[in-house]
Amino acid sequence: MISLIFPMLFSPPPTSIRLEDVTASSGLEATMTSGGTPSRAILEVKGGGLALVDLDGDGDLDLFLPNGATLESPRKGPGARLFRNDSVPGSIRFTDVTAASGIRHAGWSFGTAAGDVDADGHEDLFVSCFGPNVLLRNRGDGTFEDITARAGVAGGDDEWSTGCALADVDLDGDLDLFVANYLAFDPAALPPPARFKGIEVLAGPKGLAPQRDRLYLNDGAGRFTDVTGPSGIAAAKPAYGLNVAVLDLVGDARPDILVGNDSEPNHLFRGEVAPDGSPRFTEIGVRSGIATNGEGLAQATMGLAIGDVDGNGRPDVFSTNFSSDTNTLHLNADGAYFDDRTARYGVGAPSRRLCGWAAAFLDLDHDGDEDLLMVNGHVYPNATRDSMDSEYAQPPLLMERTGEKGGKFLVRESAGPWTLEPHRDRTAVFADLDRDGAVDAVIGELNGPLRVIRGLADPARSLVVGLRDGRPGVGNARGIGAVITARSRDAAGVELVQRRWLWGGGPFQSTLSPEAHFGFPPGTSTVDLEVRWPDGTVTRREGIAPGTPRVVIGRTG
Amino acid sequence: MLGTGAFAEAEVVLAAWTQERPGDVRLRFLLGLAVQKQRNYHRARELIASSLAGETDFPERKHAHHFLGWCLYYLGEPEASAESFRRHLELVPDEPDSTFALGLIALDAGDLDAAEARFVRAIELQSGPGANPRDLAKALARLGDVREQRDLHAEAEGLYMQSLAKYPNSVEAWEKLARVRDRLGKDREAASARNEAGRARERIGGEAP
């Protein structure tokens, strides 16, 4: 059956990538609520985000699920969930600690961002919602308190916030907050249906009123000021913001803000400094080429992934899109221009039948290049091949990089049975959950159970690198915005340079995990690591052997 | 109805006739064509492929591979799509749109030399009397894409302008012209091209870009 639905996913060559679904043995039992089934309104189809972050300070990554609600009860759903990571190498285990955490948030949540907003050494949680947003302060004893009011980050009561990012946009050492907003929506008055390929479908986003994104600056103690207007963010025309990435895309050593907008041109806010020293942003999306695909067409831009595909040392941007369109790869030519090179790298055609969401560049086979993994699922419950060229439930799409920097990404289906299973997936987070050196994943499905996927790549050929900025009063201790470069030589002496960006934001409404994962080809003996911190200073660690357990690179006063 | 662009209406009529005469492969092909023109490629592909399954001849049969090729292209199957276009060219040598399509598939594959050869040939074939200026414009713009990917920005600009001279409603070509002018440092001209793209959008309204 599946081969009839996705014929191009079959009969590709075998792959060395191996991933297995370990949900059943992980202890993770949670459903990502997002409206009813089938979906009747656009509010129900986006799902929510996830965060993998060390909330208890024990060195491994715990899981936060903000969770959604329903049209009948849009302000109160089943509630957020928190799971402690109790994994040991080779075995991923989670334990539900929601009750003990004191987290009572039950609003309709979409995005989440994790970071230490008050510089007390503990990771806090921001949740973007339909309605007021929420900031949960980590007390450091396993419990959380809602500090939204005193932090000043609730946003408007009538706002629908989606992707969000904690990042140091003014380079003062603390974590600021960017919140993408989607559109105005009244769950009690559903808009009349729209049409897609001649079929009646749920309405939006076109025809509904887009909402303006928000930027907040942190005073370092977790109190925020809304600077959307004075920073220049408000100068951009409101669009249907879905996802956000904060990192230096332009190459001028200041953080920029990329907002993926649904069916409207993306925004790229270039970071600048006003004469009074405050941060300013100028919208350069269209001028840079990243606002649209190469045909000049706005896309849905759900998921965002950052990687150095062409090896020029600059961050390239991959985005997932709607069915009957393609996912898009924008190569960062020189910081000023992004070129659509989707077709050249083979990532377009296989995505035409898919509606893509969270995506990530990951070295899943530890061969020294990054592969692509993305999760999929249509928004229209009535989507079928016959009606829309696309099924409602869709399998993930795994694409393996073929090696050299000019090499294409090739579709792989044999990485494990789970890669063939169709779902209504929306989000995913990726990290080494069991400290075995291979990257794992937690996937969130619309009104479906969370799934845990374990990577089985050779741990002797990887490095997992985390950052720790130990300077007093620095909230951005995990180095969000930093770039980590790994230099190595293979058995033949050929140099391999790999880069990872610890950007603010995440795959889709989720938080990018606070670690960089590198794979290395056989014969690699040592690796030299270089961290370029967000403020431009550099820290180096040399001569690290692949297979070394998690490496933490720090700096102090 | 097919000739006047009333594809949805044509589909209804052809579907009814096909039900009455399920063995009529020509009807099945025409129904597939009506569906394909509404961008419903999976169903169109099945109908067109089934019309080609037997040996039964019908007047449009030699062109069926062309329409099947576009279905496969938009379903994300470039290799199968290219095979269909090649088969069409075996039956109808020098058919310009299949020539153009093979250029597009080569461009997607990053084979710039093959893409250029196909687009140049498509432009030659589209330049004769009675040629469709919109199709000629498409080929000129895609040749511009090849030059742009070779970092020959000035040549790309010239080709986009030639394309727009043939068909000024192409939003895509205006946007590409703006981008290549950005790269050439022609800021004012780039802004002008973006304005034209906006005007073209308004002109075509709901028409597909």
Image: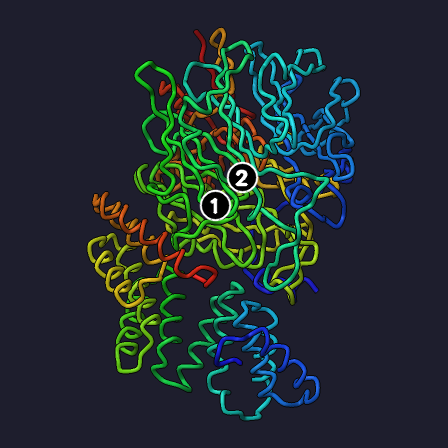
State the residue in front, A527 or B115. Answer: B115
Rendered residue at 45%/9% (across/down): A556
Binning the other alpha carbons within 10 Å of mark 1 as few (below 14), some (14 to 19) or many (20 upward) gives many
Mark 1: which amino acid?
Glu
In the rendered image, residues at marks 1 and 2 fall on the same chain: yes
Mark 2: which amino acid?
Pro
Q: Quadrant of the C terminus of chain A?
A: top left
Question: In this image, A549 relative to A491: left or right?
Answer: right
Quadrant hosting residue A159 = top right
Rendered residue at 49%/45% (across/down): A319
**x and y percentages locating residue A406 in the rendered image:** 37, 51
What colour scheme has been applied to the protein in the rendered image?
rainbow
Q: Quadrant of the N terminus of chain A?
A: bottom right
* Residue at mark 2: A210
Binning the other alpha carbons within 10 Å of mark 2 as few (below 14), some (14 to 19) or many (20 upward) gives many
Rendered residue at 53%/15% (across/down): A224
Q: Chain of mark 2?
A: A
Q: Secondary structure at mark 1?
A: loop
